[in-house]
Amino acid sequence: MSIAIPNRQLFIDGDWKVPALGKRIPIINPSTQQIIGDIPAATKEDVDAAVAAAKAALSRNKGADWASASGAVRARYLRAIAVKVTEKKPELAKLEAIDCGKPLDEAAWDIDDVAGCFEFYADLAEKLDSKQKAPVSLPMDTFKSYVLKEPIGVVGLITPWNYPMLMATWKVAPALAAGCAAILKPSELASVTCLELGEICKEVGLPPGVLNILTGLGPEAGAPLAVHPDVDKIAFTGSSATGSKIMTAAAQLVKPVSLELGGKSPIVVFEDVDLDKAAEWTIFGCFWTNGQICSATSRLIVHESIATEFLNRIVKWIKNIKISDPLEEGCRLGPVVSEGQYEKVLKFISNAKSEGATILTGGSRPEHLNKGFFVEPTVITDVTTSMQIWREEVFGPVLCVKTFSTEEEAIDLANDTVYGLGSAVISNDLERCERITKAFKAGIVWINCSQPCFTQAPWGGVKRSGFGRELGEWGLDNYLSVKQVTKYISDEPWGWYHSPSKM
């Protein structure tokens, strides 16, 4: 199942362009630790070229080619992209798996979601036409008012490495549907499929400059994009630390930002559950995508009366997870994305142990794998709320555990975090689930499950997990500005001042 990595350049103004400084970054397969190709490394000069191309795309033919074209016109391109993504699914899924380490089955699921996301925003682009000039009810019959929704303009989209093509699509699809022109800057740790999106845009004839794709390092490519005066908005998904820097940079130009940042999400399991169903959702919520999910429910809060039996059940489920090269059939846990991430995860585990926590299972490299950045699914008990493992995001397959005795205690533990992205409650008492849902301080709540995500539903957090919402109609609103238009319709003069003609 080997596949060659395409040799791409930067995608600027509808074509492949060699980076201004000619630099490239090696691609390391996280399963083998071997260099399997390279990607172009953009710098400020390339950012300037991409932004200029995006500005030109919006003004070309007085905007008629894209920004002020009908939503139906933009929808045709988005649907064409979706078709191409589906056609290329086998290749794209394999590229995703070997680039970021996620199991092939997961990668294939992601590519289906990419196509579905473009289709969804094609539909919303068409509906946008009918929503223009929506009337506003006024208290004075001498005026009529309506609202226009217009593209924000040139947008910078900075995306992470855990869902390379899908997270890019969450931003690209609504931005294009809205009529914006975009510069996509994916993570240098996993950019291959994002560059293939550029090839797809070429194949479907997307107007030049509407989407530009710059791979490269954050300080050299991401930072110049965030501070560029001709970029009208930044949308970022990634760490809270980087999000704070982007927000600070954008503030200098009063530039809007939307941020989807880190998380340390809770999953609360009550005593009335089916233990096997709850165990599977618990490990799925933490170990899906090799544990590298911003919304991972990595803090298990379990009722004390079932804790011992439930944890025993979880360990049995974990022992049944196939850890292997992502391309192997049946793989359910691959490597983390890089050597740096591998060392970071193991350091978290080591620190937890030194602080007095217990490694119930996992905690090291799987014995049967002597290469690759693999970490066993790890469960840590005897955790206190002051420990690093409880408070900080690991971004790896590590679950920490605390017990509770009352509903109030469970809620307090769940909300004991600076983050607020995801949260989950598992109980057969649906009234209790509703109470917990209202009490959770998070942007997303899952009841009797963890991690399901649908293009139609809003996604985003509160507190230090960021602000703004992606997906659904909320995702489109991210890239639209609202213009009020009010018209005086009376034949009578306004009459506030004395008319000179009557003096």
Image: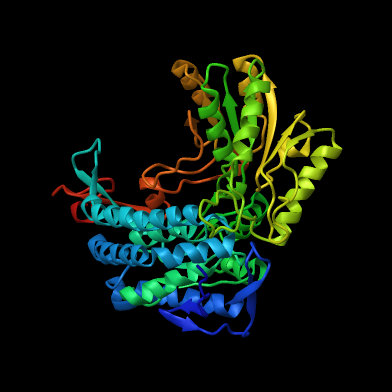
The image quadrant of residue 189 is bottom right
Q: Nearer the viewer, residue 87 or 255?
A: 87
Residue farthest to the left? 491
Judge whether 126 appears above or below 451 on screen: below
Q: How many marks?
A: 0
Q: Nearer the viewer, residue 468 or 96?
A: 96
Residue at image x 24%, y 66%? 73
Residue at image x 57%, y 34%? 282
Residue at image x 64%, y 55%? 335
Query: Can I make out residue 207 in this image?
Result: no
The image quadrant of residue 92 is bottom left
Q: Nearer the viewer, residue 346 or 324?
A: 324
Query: Can I make out residue 107 in this image?
Result: yes
Percent x, y of residue 411: 61, 22
Colour option used: rainbow
Percent x, y of residue 15: 43, 81
Judge whether 165 appears above or below 487 on screen: below
Q: Nearer the viewer, residue 308 or 180?
A: 308
Residue farthest to the front? 368
Percent x, y of residue 459: 47, 44
Percent x, y of residue 143: 21, 45
Q: Is residue 357 left or right of residue 491?
A: right
